[in-house]
Amino acid sequence: FRVRGVSGGGPHALCTASLLPDRVDACAVVSGLPPLGPDGRELPRLLLFELRLGRRAPRVAAALLTAARLLVRRRATVNWLICRFAACPGDARALSSGAAAEASFRAFREAVGSGARAVLADAEPYSRPWGCAPEDIRAPVRVFPGLRDSTAAWRHLRPVAERVPSAA
């Protein structure tokens, strides 16, 4: 089979290709992030806050995220949060109105509505080793960086892509 990972699915796609070399025919990563280490350097502020709080005070993080369910009922509050913690001013502008704002609002509500554990788990692939080695991937790998993506910037994924023997 072939596997593709978009954004947070990138680590999962690469690990699938690494850990199932006889089953994966090809792998693609679209705007994916590699593990950035325990300090999460260069991550968007909201994700970085989430990682640090979740690691240092998981019960506090869970309580805050549970309380956030009450806040996410109002679109204006969610839009303010998203824009406040956006990775760059361009992201904030794009997420402040229109279809992008509506999609962000719905995604944020769904994420927080899934519970604190799910939100905190979503950040884990970026802060811990994956448990697989890019050097072990035998299937062809195509990497499609988001050249204007400030969250999943090419500078983050390039070091991992260079370790994959068949990456293009």
Image: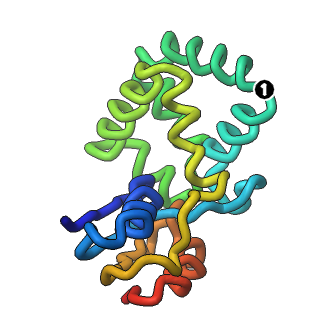
Could you say whether the residue bearing mark 1 is in a helix, strand or loop? loop
> Is 138 above or below relative to 97?
below
Residue type for callout 1? Ala
User: Quick one: 149 or 102, which is closer to the camera?
Assistant: 149
> Is 167 above or below relative to 97?
below
Rendered image quadrant of residue 131: bottom right
Q: Residues within 10 Å of mark 1 (few under 14, many from 20)?
A: few
Rendered image quadrant of residue 65: top right
In this orientation, does residue 154 appear? no
In this orientation, does residue 3 appear? yes
**Residue at far left of view:** 1
Question: What residue do we see at 43% from left, 43% from top?
Answer: 96
> Is 74 above or below relative to 12?
above
User: Dividing the image into 4 quarters, which one contains the C terminus?
Assistant: bottom left
Question: What residue do we see at 23% from left, 75% from top?
Answer: 25
**Residue at far front of view:** 22
User: Quick one: 140 or 110, which is closer to the camera?
Assistant: 140
> Is 10 above or below relative to 72?
below
Question: What residue do we see at 46% from left, 67% from top?
Answer: 149
Residue 123, image x and y in percent?
A: 57, 44
Question: What residue do we see at 38% from left, 61% from top?
Answer: 16
The residue identified by callout 1 is: 57
Residue 21, image x and y in percent?
A: 35, 72
